[in-house]
Amino acid sequence: MQDHKSAFEAIYGEVISQGLCVACGACVGYCPYLEYKDGKVVIIDSCKVGTGRCEAVCPQMDILRNGPGKAALEEGGGYFLSKALPKEFTKNAQYGGVVSAMVSYLLSTGRAEKAVLTDRGGKGSPKGVLVHSPLEVISLGGSRYTASASLSALNRLLKDGQPQRVVVVGLPCQMRAVSLMEKRSEIRSEQVFKIGLFCTWAMEYREMSKLLEKEGVLETPIRFDIPPPPKNIFLVEGQRGKWEIPLDRMRVAIQKGCALCPDMTGSYADISVGAAEGIEGHNTVCVRDTRGFELLEELTQKGILKVEALPEANLSHLKTAIKNKRERATTKLKERVSHGDI
Amino acid sequence: MEIYRRELDNSKVLLQGNEAIARGALEANVVFGAGYPGNPSSEIIETLAEAAKSLPIYVEWSTNEKVALEAATAASFSGLRSIVTMKQNGLNVASDFLTNLTLSGTKGGLVLVTCDDPSGISSTNEEDARWFSRLADVPLLEPSTPQEALHMVKDAFWLSEQIQNVVILRSISRLSHTRADVKLGTLPDFRVRPYFDPKVPFHTFPIVPKHQRRHEKLRKAKEWAEACPYNEYFGNTEKDFVIVSSGCAFLYAYEAVEDLGLWDQVGILKIGVSYPLPERLILDTLKSASKVLFLEDVDPFIEEGVMALLSAHANGVKPKEFFGRNSSHIPVAGETNPYLIRRFLSDYFGKDLAYGEFRNRIQKLLEGKVPPREFGFCPGCPHRGTYYAIKKALAWDHREGFVSGDIGCYTMGIWPTGFNMVKSVHAMGSGVGLSSGYGKLKELGFGQPVVTVCGDSTFFHAALPAIVNAKFNNSDMLLIVLDNSATAMTGFQPHPGTGKTAMGSITEPVSIEGICRSMGMEVEVIDPYEIEESAQLIYEFLQKSGPRLIVARRKCALVQGREGGFPFRMRVNEERCRGEECGCGRYCTRVFRCPGLVYENKKKKAMIDEVICVGCGICASICPMGAVERGER
Amino acid sequence: MILNLVITGVGGQGNVLASQILGRAGVKKGLSVTIGETFGLSQRGGPVMSHVRFHDGRVVGPIIPPNMADIIMGLEPLETLRVLPELGRPDTLYLVNKRPIYPLNVIAGDVAYPPLEGIKEILQENSRKLLWVDGTTKSMELGGAIFLNTIMLGALVSLDNFPLTIEDIEEIFRVTFKGERLSQNLSALQIGRELVLEYDQES
Ligand SMILES: Cc1cc2nc3c(=O)[nH]c(=O)nc-3n(C[C@H](O)[C@H](O)[C@H](O)COP(=O)(O)OP(=O)(O)OC[C@H]3O[C@@H](n4cnc5c(N)ncnc54)[C@H](O)[C@@H]3O)c2cc1C
């Protein structure tokens, strides 16, 4: 169907120029044509290669062409309540530090040589980094609410073609992208451990910065949070203060492409981690495969994680959220089809 | 050619048109020369500057053409002979002073040389500067050969002193860059006594009488034109079909009439004084002609002058058919050339063009087979790096930014060699003036960032007032000065920033950063060879407001080549090179386009062309695979 | 008219210097010379062409009239092919350096460089004679691409009935160059001469 277009023309025409790119970074860092700069995947020049990976690994392209895909939790998976026990993992963490704990463990046991994480930004937006020491992992705890194209860091590894055991932490779009890379045999499933973060949407860096500046935030924030509904606020914490900004004032910064994403929990990940509504300092963890269960068990045994059953109220809230996001995306997708956009 | 050596007096040597003009000026006892470089005029001042190293004369590159004319006028007012040189655009710049000066008149002979560039071979426009002679009411001489140029310059000085006004000598690229054997005269002793007589002031008041006086001077020049040898009729006595022509077009016409065997049907009136026209000679030659063909470069200047003359004397002349630019028998634009002339004459007189069939056959045979040769920056050129950095910065910035350009080698930024970054080019310094305007459009809702580029020489020539304007009006202007330490386009002439004068003496360099800092502009310097760092800085500067300057500093690659060359011997690691595969898609050759880096179609790998590559090493940072490696020389 | 010679090539190949040397040698020999040069922006890797006309003092222009070239010396094959329809005629002699300098649009893959064999064939079939030589390789052996113009000059003046001799050029070199530059350029002239001699022997 798309044979006459180059891969680049497809991804540019159908995703980027349509404003549907969510800056996951799957197409960035592998070739010289696509780069990530401060919240945007930008075009340096146009590429003429017929069939290329940019088109094949783009999660938005996958949704446009193949629909919503995998359900949040298939048979055999489970939801848990968890938190990291050692203080070092929680001091910078967003909530329970489960992600930082898992990544540190995988690196220190040599099960992963490198971790693909997101840095804190500063001079410009947060972006992908390759990390190999647990100390660095701890220093990068916490959530940046802007998309960071952090998969560009994974691409840098793939470009050199070296077999690596990596752990990738990322948003649902990024988990989908990594699974597309696996499908293309760019990386073998057993080489890559995927830790997903729950996500409703992410903001675009430049828009967010502009809004924050208007709100009087004139520094690089250290911490963001969106407390559970009905609060409806965006919390920003910096060196010089704390700001509580009505979430509605921030909504214009949300990436347009996020509306197309059906996935709340990172369904393509081995393990996904999110907030545990109303239970401070804890995470909701969603485990999907044997590797996931084994890791969780090991960490529990070692006393690094505390794992319990997820309370019924949390589970039902989460399921509603999952359902809502999928329905919203499906409607959006249909709209685009009926408008002839795709 | 060391044309200033006295041993050469009275001998025959090979001289370029511009050298012949310079030699003519020297033989005329010129002691002051000034100009601004611009193809095809530059070699005149260069030659004189070389001569100034051993003769007691003064020669300078001025900051622009108006200043050059003003500086040279000081010599004239003090009774000395002076010459000013420029290209057609330069006369536009100088024209404000010229139209005033010609009212006040001059004293020592003052000859203004304009070298026009028909077809704009190395210009941003095609312009016929001869119109300025009419605008300023001054004589205009047009030589056809280097030999004639030498003589004409000498007579131009004489005429200037006779009428106490400027005389314009007009060359074109074709003549300026013709080399021919020229018989030299003798050099004078250059002894002069400069003196400004306070009793004789030079100004334009009272205006109307001065204007009247200017016309009287012109009338005097016309008398001289009637009898001077530069206007001459060649050919049969019937004078039925007459070609009126000047400059190189005269030569082409003469050869064509000869080769086509048309002397019994065609005569040629050569015009050497194109303004004021020799009326009596023209009326005499054309009164019984029935057909007149005009051949000149570029505009129908003589054509319209002659037509006006003939209408004023319509009673006494035969009705005529005119062929020329006005009648579209000669295209309204572009250089006059032998083919054009021969085609017209052979069609008109029913003669065969020699080898016409051969020409047509070969043209058909080669159709579509001879690709054009795209203009490009030299291997090692810093502009390629700067434009690449700008390209990246604007892509990152993502607000549809663009570049407002200017004149110099870097004008090629309008083409793929400069990644088509530059979206407008006009007169010297105009890119900056435009940008001072774009920088105010934000207040009217304009959201696109603009980068303006200008060369180091252009900075001093005409960009300065525009920069001050941006500062004065607090415009959001980002200026990048492409400082390659030379006026590279026109042949590496020094300028105020280089610390050297035309005559080679050392002078304190005028600092571009210093000027801008003193105005309170934010200033940074980048190295065009460090592409990523440069792009990052440009990107950061794009986010700022107010007038700001980045100096992109690297020596012109041609100069660097002469001064010891480059450090690297580049090679392509074929194992790493991805060629056409995904992840590269021939990025270096397809996008970066350096002539030293070619693509081997059979191997599907990039390759260094050792004949072309100079070893600057920039391309190593372009390759996404690090396959282009910097080796030792 | 004694001779109409076209020298064509690409900016940076030393075209203008070669024509100037020829002109000076011509004047020294008492010939009248008119040389037209076309460059400008072209000195930046674009086409550069010189028209060198040796004559007897008559009125001649700096442009050789259409299809009136006696000899076309091409420093680059594509640029030689380019001038063929406008300046060549069936009895023109071509002296061509066969090493291409690829235009940027060819390097970029936008257009193809015509096959060298094809260029050679077209020139051969539509001329009096073609000398298709590898001047660039010889030049690189001598120490760099800059000697190409001198090598080609050596070849040019060694052609039968050329109005100048190799000694005429040497004389100009002796007042133009010094030291190593002089000896290298003198060798380059000889290399050019040998190219022509060998060529005639081979064919
Ligand atoms: C944009 C975004 C939206 C989110 N939306 C929700 C939501 O709606 N509901 C919910 O329950 N949870 C959401 N989360 C997840 C939540 O904020 C926590 O990241 C998660 O609970 C893990 O907590 P933790 O304490 O284990 O993390 P930590 O141990 O602090 O580790 C966090 C890890 O996240 C990585 N990271 C930080 N920012 C980004 C980013 N922008 N992109 C990719 N990786 C990043 C860091 O590299 C770090 O390793 C979101 C996270 C992000 C980044």
Image (tube, rainbow, N blue to C red):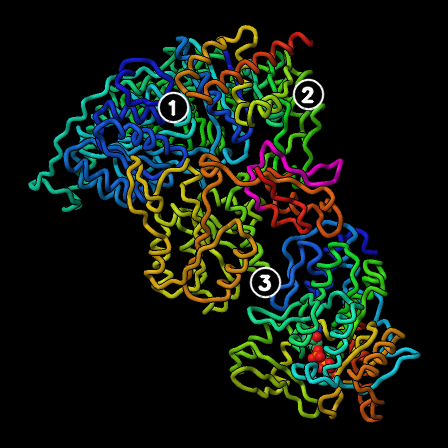
| Magenta: main secondary structure | loop
Q: Residue at x 93, y 79 (%)?
A: A75
Depicted B369 relative to depicted B456: above or below:
above
Q: Chain of mark 1?
A: B
Q: Residue at x 28, y 40 (%)?
A: B68
Crowding at dot 3, Cα within 10 Å, few <14 / some 14-19 / many 20+, comes out as some
Indicate the quadrant where residue C115 lies.
top right
The disc at residue B16 is 1
Q: CA distance from mark 1 to mark 3?
A: 50 Å
Q: Is residue B606 magenta?
A: yes
Indicate the quadrant where residue C104 lies.
top right
Q: Chain of mark 3?
A: B
Q: Under tag 1, what secondary structure?
A: strand
Disc 3 marks which residue? B398
**Residue A101 drawn at (x, y percent):** 74, 78
Horizontal relation, residue A294 to residue B461: left or right? right
**Residue type marked 3:** His
**Residue type marked 2:** Lys
Instruction: Looking at the image, tell me whether mark 1 or mark 3 is earlier in sequence order.
Output: 1
Q: CA distance from mark 3 to mark 2?
A: 49 Å
**Residue type marked 1:** Gln
**Residue B334 drawn at (x, y percent):** 48, 33
Disc 2 marks which residue? C120
Indicate the quadrant where residue A14 lies.
bottom right
